[in-house]
Image: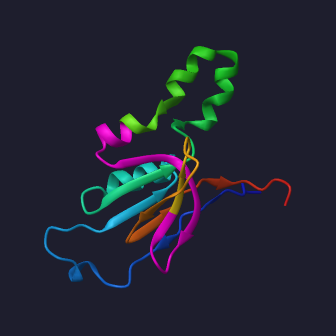
């Protein structure tokens, strides 16, 4: 029996092609989720898109190694890192620590609630990739 892991990665795309865009302008890509798939997508798209990554966690975590951290707590530093400095300084993409409350594919925007805010902001995109993780569903 195989492990029931479904990576949710959907792509909402704009109605016109890249060629319709003006010279020098890049389309906006919104990536929801910043673990493996979201981070790799941001890295690969940053040269042709203005990339914004949104995640409700401020850190990356290598989950399979977490059990080892229970017996050796110092190992946790090798399994995690803070996302903002890596994504913004090292990769050159924008990071928003927040929660996507709604996504409008027709009008191409996401309503985002930053973690420490009481209101939502609208983040526009031309393309949106949802990389929100795995669903193991052991009780389904």
- The residue that appears at 57% across and 46% down in the rendered structure is 56
Q: Residue furthest left?
A: 23
Above or below 94: residue 19: below
Query: Residue 109: where, in percent of width, then height?
Result: 46, 69
Residue 4, quarter of the rendered image: bottom right
> Which residue is at the front of the view, 11 or 110?
110
Above or below 57: residue 2: below
**Residue 97 belongs to magenta span:** yes
- The residue that appears at 44% across and 38% down in the rendered structure is 83
Query: Residue 117: where, in percent of width, then height?
Result: 55, 45
Boundaries of the magenta span = 86-110
- The residue that appears at 58% across and 48% down in the rendered structure is 118
Above or below 86: residue 21: below
> Which residue is at the front of the view, 121 or 67?
121
Check the picture and name the quadrant holding the N terminus: bottom right
Query: Residue 51: where, in percent of width, then height?
Result: 34, 57
Query: Residue 106: where, in percent of width, then height?
Result: 49, 81
**Residue 94 belongs to magenta span:** yes
């Amino acid at each position: 029996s195989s492990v029931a892991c479904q990576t949710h990665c959907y792509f909402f795309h704009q109605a016109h092609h890249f060629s319709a865009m003006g010279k020098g302008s890049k389309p906006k890509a919104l990536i929801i989720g910043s673990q493996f798939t979201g981070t790799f997508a941001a890295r690969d798209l940053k040269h042709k898109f203005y990339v914004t990554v949104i995640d409700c966690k401020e850190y990356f975590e290598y989950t399979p190694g977490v059990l080892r951290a229970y017996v050796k707590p110092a190992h946790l530093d090798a399994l995690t890192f803070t996302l903002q400095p890596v994504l913004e300084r090292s990769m050159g993409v924008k990071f928003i620590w927040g929660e996507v409350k709604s996504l409008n594919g027709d009008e191409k925007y996401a309503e985002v609630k930053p973690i420490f805010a009481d209101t939502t902001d609208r983040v526009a995109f031309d393309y949106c990739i949802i990389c929100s993780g795995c669903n193991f569903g052991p009780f389904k």
